[in-house]
Image (cartoon, helix red, strand yellow):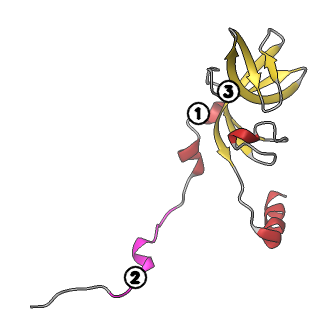
Amino acid sequence: MAVETTASFPNPAQDYFEGQISLDRHLVRRPTSTFVLRVSSDALASMGIRAGDELLVDRALSPAPGRVLVVLLDDERRLGRFDVVDGVAVLATDHEQIPLTSDVEPWGVATVLLHHLPLGPAGERERRNIAR
């Protein structure tokens, strides 16, 4: 009686993917209303959102408690978590809570966080060259 066994790992070519991965198709539900914004501070570090990260922001989504929002305040984009505190809607960061009054314009809802992993000194040079 013969028993078939495998003493090595499978051939990687058997699992080779022919084609291209489309990040747009996987990450962007509404291309006409989705934008990429780069985060410029660590104000939401407690949520894992750090300076240098990029967010996909969908302008067609409605603000809701717990969502990460981008708002316009004094012609500046601000990022925070939409919360309701004592019945008042606020944009909360790790350092402040901004009441969402009529002078704060909701701009979009963050849907995807793109966080770049450290690559070491050579990788950082590589990343800078790609960004140019």
Query: Where does the magenta region start and end?
Result: 7-19
> Residue at (78%, 30%) from the top-left corner?
93
The residue tagged 1 is 30
Label 2 – label 1 distance at C-alpha: 41 Å
The numbered mark, 3 or 1, whose residue comes first in the sequence reads 1
Q: Position of residue 100 (x, y in %)?
A: 77, 14
Image location (x, y in percent) of residue 11: 41, 81
Q: Which amino acid does the dot numbered 1 rest on?
A: Arg
User: Is residue 10 found left or right of 117 in the rendered image?
Assistant: left
Give the residue at mark 3.
Answer: 59
Residue 49 belongs to the span the image colors magenta? no
Where residue 4 sits in the image (x, y, percent)? 21, 86
Residue 61 sits above or below residue 44 on the image: above
How far across and how far down the image is residue 122, in percent?
A: 81, 73
User: Does residue 112 lie above or below 121 as drawn?
Assistant: above
Q: Give the residue at mark 2.
A: 9
Q: Earlier in the sequence, mark 2 or mark 1?
A: 2
Q: CA distance from mark 3 to mark 1?
A: 9 Å
Residue at (46% x, 67% y) in the render: 17
**Circle nearer the N terminus (2, 3):** 2
